[in-house]
Amino acid sequence: MYDFEKYIKPVWEGNMVIDESFMPVEKEDGTIDPIPLLFKADKTLSVKNSKHTTTYKLLA
């Protein structure tokens, strides 16, 4: 369930970015360049697919 209020709150009024999207692009040699986030992340709470049907395990 989505919390609409969390999604419409401007990022400069809080300390959390919710559901920042990115799209990894594989190069011809099969590698993928690092993908920078819009803001520096102190902590990653979760990584999910765009439909929120899969949560990926974070490796330490």
Image (tube, grey):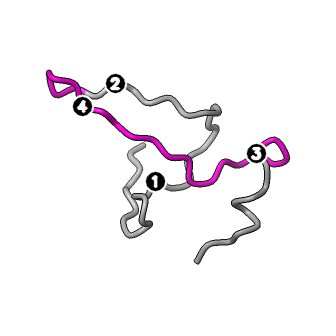
- Estimate how packed mark 3 is, as few (under 14), some (14 to 19) or many (20 or more) residues with alpha carbons within 10 Å: few
Q: Quadrant of the N terminus?
A: bottom right
Q: Amino acid at mark 3?
A: Val
Q: Earlier in the sequence, mark 2 or mark 1?
A: 2
Q: Which residue is mark 3?
A: 11
Looking at the image, residue 37 sits to the left or right of residue 59; the answer is right
Q: CA distance from mark 3 to mark 2?
A: 26 Å
Q: CA distance from mark 2 to mark 4?
A: 8 Å
Q: Which residue is mark 1?
A: 47
Q: Amino acid at mark 2?
A: Asp
Q: Quadrant of the C terminus?
A: top left
Q: Earlier in the sequence, mark 3 or mark 4?
A: 3
Q: Earlier in the sequence, mark 3 or mark 2?
A: 3
Q: Amino acid at mark 4?
A: Glu
Q: Which residues are magenta?
A: 11-31
Q: Earlier in the sequence, mark 1 or mark 3?
A: 3
Q: Earlier in the sequence, mark 2 or mark 4?
A: 4
Counting from the top left corner in percent of width and height, residue 22 is at 45, 41
Q: Give the structural element (helix, strand or loop) at label 2.
A: loop
Circle 2/circle 4 CB separation < 8 Å: no
Main secondary structure found in the magenta portion:
loop
Q: Which residue is mark 2?
A: 33
